[in-house]
Image: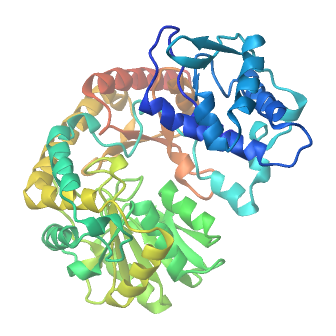
């Protein structure tokens, strides 16, 4: 009942506002549905009394707000299958008590009443008024440890956010409108193709040329972002309790996915050459190996060729699948692109995961998997069953965006933009760097790491920055095994130049003050 009322709820209107016409009539249908649920129950009370009490309660509770228009008595009677006199009697009583008012030629409206909705003992004990954590399963509770509180905005220096202010919105909207207007009728139905063929063909060309990925269009499965791709891989290739190797420190999204699947997470140390599988004392038998070889997240190192070949050999030896997350390989500065791990060896046990969240925008919610031949059919079928395919008009627009060269031009512009923003951040932090603050090389990607020597400094800077509207992500939080190395992950791509300068200068001063006091 409450859900139906909330869906119907209209925004307050001015005292002399005209009737809302067809829009108001549509919402009136939702009110009739909600009242039908109330009146359909068993009761000894007359229908007029029950209708009166339901409307009065909703007005008092604020579910029908001041100034909201009610359907006419004739319409409501017809929707509820009641006699009109029954509805009129309930309305008359509410009018007499001041809960409703009529406006000549406009209809019946909720009166402007100053009700205060205080929490009662009943609402305090209701499921909506208590801490939701108490209702979660053990798996759900464990998952929340990897889920930070959501932010409504992106202050400096949130990692992983692209330069939304530089996205070619007008150009993209023109493509979107054209494909929405001319999309085939069958795109409105359920799809099982694995994605729009034109997009898979464009991606195959792009990946073969730019990333040395070995693939045909048929091996590409379009998914709703990389995160959903991880979930599909875990569902189809592992069981609860299976071992997964993952980088330490590593990406929270992957950690959350593996925790939700109740996998046995085995952190593998990362050094200057990337994931170091030989450093494991008791390697066990992994079913999955998650890695970001082109630009390790969050440390920023690139996995050496020797380590890549060792990882491929380990996967073959253990019968494990490597999940290669190539999340931002488009953005490299003064360094030649590194070929994807997937393309090093023919028939490698690698699933390549790509996303458009970084190079386009996160709200696009499109990613893709490049699957080994034996996995193509089962993954396509499972994806269509579990998640359903969709956004075919959006996929078609993206295919044209790539085919017409807009994508490659946008990547080049963003590469220049991010290089410039990284330089600006380094300049802002220069006074601290001159006194010993160490920054990562920053030869690729969308963030820098500021290495710290003291965990207390990390906590202090994060807490103080929050009060300045600055988001500092503690490096230690990316480790599965506490305490983790202290540091700060500084995203610069999605932060405008003026804010980079302000926040960077503040951070330099704050770090200098801390070090001067120790």
Tell which of 343 and 444 is nearer to you. Answer: 343
Instruction: Find residue 74 and report its horizontal and vertical position in percent.
Output: 60, 32
Instruction: Find residue 62 and report its horizontal and vertical position in percent.
Output: 69, 23
Residue 79, picture quadrant: top right
- From the viewer's perspective, tell me whether residue 32 is left or right of residue 420: right
- From the viewer's perspective, tell me whether residue 49 is left or right of residue 138: right
Residue 423, picture quadrant: top left
Residue 155, picture quadrant: top left
Tell which of 94 and 349 is nearer to you. Answer: 94
Query: Quadrant where the C terminus lies?
Result: top right
Visual colour scheme: rainbow
Total numbered labels:
0
- From the viewer's perspective, tell me whether residue 476 is left or right of residue 397: right
- Residue located 56% across and 11% down the image: 103
Furthest-right residue in this view = 44
In the image, residue 188 sits, relative to residue 106, either above or below, namely below
Instruction: Find residue 22 and report its horizontal and vertical position in percent.
Output: 43, 32
Camera sees residue 151: no
Furthest-left residue in this view = 404
In the image, residue 41 sits, relative to residue 216, either above or below, namely above
Query: Quadrant where the N terminus lies?
Result: top right
Camera sees residue 30: yes
- Residue located 39% across and 70% down the image: 190
- From the viewer's perspective, tell me whether residue 436 is left or right of residue 71: left
Instruction: Find residue 61 and report its horizontal and vertical position in percent.
Output: 74, 25
- Residue located 37% across and 27% down the image: 432
């Amino acid at each position: 009942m409450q859900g139906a009322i909330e869906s119907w709820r209209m925004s307050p209107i001015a005292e002399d506002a005209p009737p809302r016409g067809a829009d108001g009539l549509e919402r009136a249908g939702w009110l009739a549905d909600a009242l039908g649920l109330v009146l359909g129950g068993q009761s000894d009370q007359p229908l007029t009394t029950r209708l009166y009490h339901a409307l009065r309660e909703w007005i008092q509770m604020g579910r029908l707000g001041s100034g909201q228009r009610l359907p006419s008595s004739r319409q409501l009677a017809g929707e509820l299958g009641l006699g009109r006199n029954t509805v009129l009697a309930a309305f008359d009583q509410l009018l007499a008590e001041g809960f409703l008012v009529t406006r000549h030629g406009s209809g019946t409206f909720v009166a402007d009443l100053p009700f205060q909705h205080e929490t009662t003992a009943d609402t305090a004990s209701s499921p909506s008024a208590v801490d939701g954590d108490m209702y979660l399963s053990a798996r759900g509770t464990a998952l929340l440890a990897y889920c930070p509180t959501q932010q409504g905005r992106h202050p400096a220096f949130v990692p992983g956010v692209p330069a939304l202010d530089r996205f070619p919105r007008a150009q993209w909207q023109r493509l979107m409108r054209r494909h929405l207007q001319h999309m085939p009728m069958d795109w409105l139905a359920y799809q099982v193709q694995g994605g729009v063929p034109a997009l898979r063909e464009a991606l195959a060309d792009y990946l073969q040329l730019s990333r040395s990925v070995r693939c045909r269009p048929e091996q590409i499965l379009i998914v709703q972002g990389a995160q959903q791709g991880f979930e599909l891989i875990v569902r189809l290739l592992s069981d609860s309790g299976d071992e997964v190797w993952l980088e330490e420190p590593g990406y929270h999204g992957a950690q959350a996915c593996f925790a939700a699947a109740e996998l046995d997470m085995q952190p593998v140390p990362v050094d200057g050459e990337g994931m170091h599988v030989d450093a494991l004392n008791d390697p066990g038998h992994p079913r999955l190996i998650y890695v970001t070889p082109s630009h390790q997240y969050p440390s920023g190192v690139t996995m050496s060729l020797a380590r890549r070949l060792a990882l491929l050999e380990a996967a073959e030896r253990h019968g494990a699948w490597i999940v290669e997350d190539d999340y931002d390989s488009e953005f490299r500065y003064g360094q030649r692109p590194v070929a994807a791990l997937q393309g090093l060896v023919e028939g490698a046990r690698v699933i390549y995961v790509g996303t458009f969240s970084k190079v386009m925008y996160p709200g696009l919610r499109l990613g893709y998997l490049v699957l080994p031949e034996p996995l193509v059919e089962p993954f396509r079928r499972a994806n269509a069953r579990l998640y359903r395919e969709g956004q075919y008009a959006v996929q078609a627009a993206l295919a044209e965006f790539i085919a017409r060269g807009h994508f490659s031009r946008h990547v080049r512009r963003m590469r220049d933009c991010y290089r410039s923003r990284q330089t600006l951040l380094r300049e802002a932090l220069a006074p601290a760097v001159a006194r010993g603050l160490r920054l990562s090389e920053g030869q690729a990607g969308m963030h820098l790491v500021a290495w710290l020597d003291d965990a207390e400094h990390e906590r202090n800077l994060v807490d103080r920055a929050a009060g300045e509207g600055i988001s500092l992500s503690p490096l230690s939080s990316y480790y599965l095994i506490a305490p983790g190395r202290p540091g700060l992950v500084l995203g610069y791509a999605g932060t405008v130049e003026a804010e980079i300068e302000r926040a960077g200068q503040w951070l330099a001063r704050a770090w200098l003050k801390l070090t001067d006091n120790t």
